[in-house]
Amino acid sequence: MGLIDPDLIRIEGLSVAFGGVPALLGIDLSVATGETLGLVGESGCGKSVTWLAALGLLPGSAAVSGSVRLDGQELVGAPVSVLERMRGGRVAMIFQDPASALNPVHRIGRQVGEAVSLHRGLSGAAARAETRRLLDEVGIPDAGGRMAAYPHEMSGGQNQRVMIAMALAGRPELLVADEPTTALDVTIQAQILDLLRRLRREHGMALVLISHDLGVVGEMCERVCVMYAGRIVEEARTEALFEAPLHPYTRGLAGALPPISGPRRRLTAIPGRVPEPWAMPPGCAFAPRCPERIEACDAAVPALRGNALRGDAPQGDARRVACIRAAA
Amino acid sequence: MIRFVAIRVARACLTILLVVTFAFVVLRLSGDPALLIMSPDAPAEAIAAFRHAYGLDRPIWQQYLHYFGAIMHGDLGQSMRDGRPALSLVAERIPATLVLTVTALVLKVGIGIPAGIFAALHRRGWIDRAVMALATAGFTVPSFVLGLVLVLVFSVQLRWLPSGGQESWRSVILPVITLGAGGAAILARFTRSAMLEVLGQPYIRAASAKGLPWGAVVRRHALPNAAIPTVTIVGFMVGSLIAGAVVVESVFSWPGVGRLLVIAVSNRDLAVVQTILLLVASTMVMSNLVVDLLYGVLDPRLRAVHK
C-alpha cells in the first residue's frame, strides 16, 4: 500500500447476512476523493445494503463483517459516536422515495434545520438563514416560504431536492444517492440528476450513484461497478464498460438499454430472475441465466480478477471482472 | 376548519340523542319500575298513583316528549326511590369515581406508554418479551378476577390494605391497580406496535443517516408519529372515566357512579339510569371529539383534509 491513499473510502471484504442468510458476499470497493462511482444491478443485488452497512444503518439483526475505512478510520464496529459524526457530516445519503424519507409531521424547514444545527452548530436565526440558503441552492422556488411546508404539500421532485439540501447541510465529502430518481417522473429525473451533477462540481464531493438504470449511471459516473447477487461482477471506467462489457450480465443490462446512436434494434431482456439468497447456485450466481454458460461455471464462484482501478493503473484498461470466460 | 368542527359537533349531538332515546325505550320496555319499587304486593291504587306520579301511565311517546322537553330545560327527573333530583344524586357520586378512574388513567398512561416504547426499542430482547408477557396477562385477566386476587393477597393474607370502602388513601390502591392493569396492558401493546410500525419507516433511517443520535431520532421522529394511533386508545380511556369502574366499584364497594348505576338498574330507577347513560355518552362523545381535533394537531396531513 502506498503512503498516500487516494481513496476517501475503502471497503474490503464487506459481507452482510440477515438471520444467517447472506445478502452481501465480500465486497471490495473504493471511492476516491471527488470521484463519481455508479453502482448498478437489479434490485436485491446488494447495492443499497453495501452502503447502509458501510454507514452502520442496518438494523442490529444484520451481521456485518469486513472492513470499511473512511480516511483510514475503520467504521465497521466503530463506536456509535464515531458513526453519528460521520453520517451526514462526511458521508451523506439520500434515498429512493423522498416522500417517505421525510418525516410527515415536521415542516421541511425544521427537518433541514435539524441537519444544519447538528453539523454546523448553528441555531436560531443563523440556522434558519442557512436552511433557507440550502433550499435555495437546491432550486426550491420561494425557499423562505416553503420552509413552513410539510412534505405532503410538496411534489416528489421538490421533496428530493429537500433531501439533497439536508444532505448538503453537513458539507459531506461523499454523497451516496440510492436510486434518487426512481420514484420520480422522467422529466423530473433529469432535473434531479442535473442538480446532483452541478452540486458535485461546485462542492467537489464524491458521489456514489446507486441505480438499476445503466443509462443513468453511464451518464453521471466516471466509473461503474456492476453488482449481481451480493457480489461485484464487473468494475470498469464508464467508457470502457460501455465500449466492451466483459461480463455477460453487464452485456445483458446494456442490451436492455435503448441505443442512443446507431440503428434501432430490438431491446433484449435477461431471462429469469436474481436467485434468492437462500437458494444460490453452487458456482457463478449468474450462470442459470447466462447465455454463455459452460460446465465449469457451476464448479466454483468466479473470482473478481484484473488490476483494480487505482491511480497507478493506466486509465482505460484497468478493470475487474468475475467471469471465467472473460479475459480481463 | 370551522366546517369540520361544526360537522363533528353535530354528529356528537346526534350520537347523544340516539343513546338517550335507546336507553329510554329499552328501560321502559324491559320492566315496570312501579312493581319493583312499590313491591308487587302493594295495593293496586298505590301502584296506580305511583305510575301517575311519574307519568308511567301515559303512552310511551308522550313520556318521551315530556322527558325530552325536560332535558332541554336541564331537568333530568327525580329518583323514584327517594324523590331527589337524579342529577344531584349522580353528581355527588362523580368525585369518588373520578378519584379511581383518573388515578387509574395516570397509571395506564404512565406505565403502558413507556413500557410499549421500551419494548419496541428492545424488540425481541428479553425486556420486550417480559413486557409483552405481562401485558398479555394484564388484559386477559378480567378485572373482577384481578380485584378478588388482590384482595385475597393484600387484604386477607397480608392484611396490608383494606378490601373495600373509602376510609383513607390506602383504600384507593387496590381498586386503582385493578382498574389500571388492563388499560396499561392494552396501551403497552398498542404503543409497541405503533412504535414498531413507525421505526420501520424510511424517514427513521433517513434521520439516522443525517447523523442524529438514536435518542433524538426516537424522540423527534418516531414518537410524534407513533402518538397518532396511541391517542385514539387514550381517548377511549378518557371517554370511559365516568362509567369505566362499574365492576371495580362493585368489587371494592366503592361509593361511585358505577355502583349507583348497578343499584339503579336493578331497581328500575329510570331517571337515575338515564342520567348516568346521558353523562357517559356525553363524556365518550366529547373525548372522541377532542381526539379528532388532536389528530389535526398531531398530523398535518389530516389538517389539509379538514380545511
Image: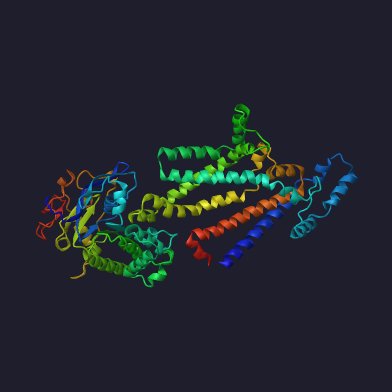
State the residue in front, B92 or B252: B92
Q: Residue furthest top?
A: B157
* Quadrant of res A167: bottom left
Residue A181's spot in the image, x, y percent?
31, 63
Q: Residue furthest bottom?
A: A142
Quick one: quadrant of the C terminus of chain A?
Answer: bottom left
The figure's colour scheme reads: rainbow
Residue B212's spot in the image, x, y percent?
36, 54
Residue A118's spot in the image, x, y percent?
35, 57
State the residue in front, B283 or B69: B283
Q: Is residue A281 left or right of residue B117?
A: left
* Quadrant of res A221: bottom left
Q: Is residue B113 left or right of residue A238?
A: right
Q: Is residue B211 left or right of residue A310?
A: right
Numbered marks: total: 0
Residue A295's spot in the image, x, y percent?
16, 46
Q: Is residue A57 left or right of residue B293?
A: left
State the residue in front, A128 or A276: A128
State the residue in front, B98 or A233: B98
Q: Is residue A51 visible?
A: yes
Q: Is residue A97 visible?
A: no
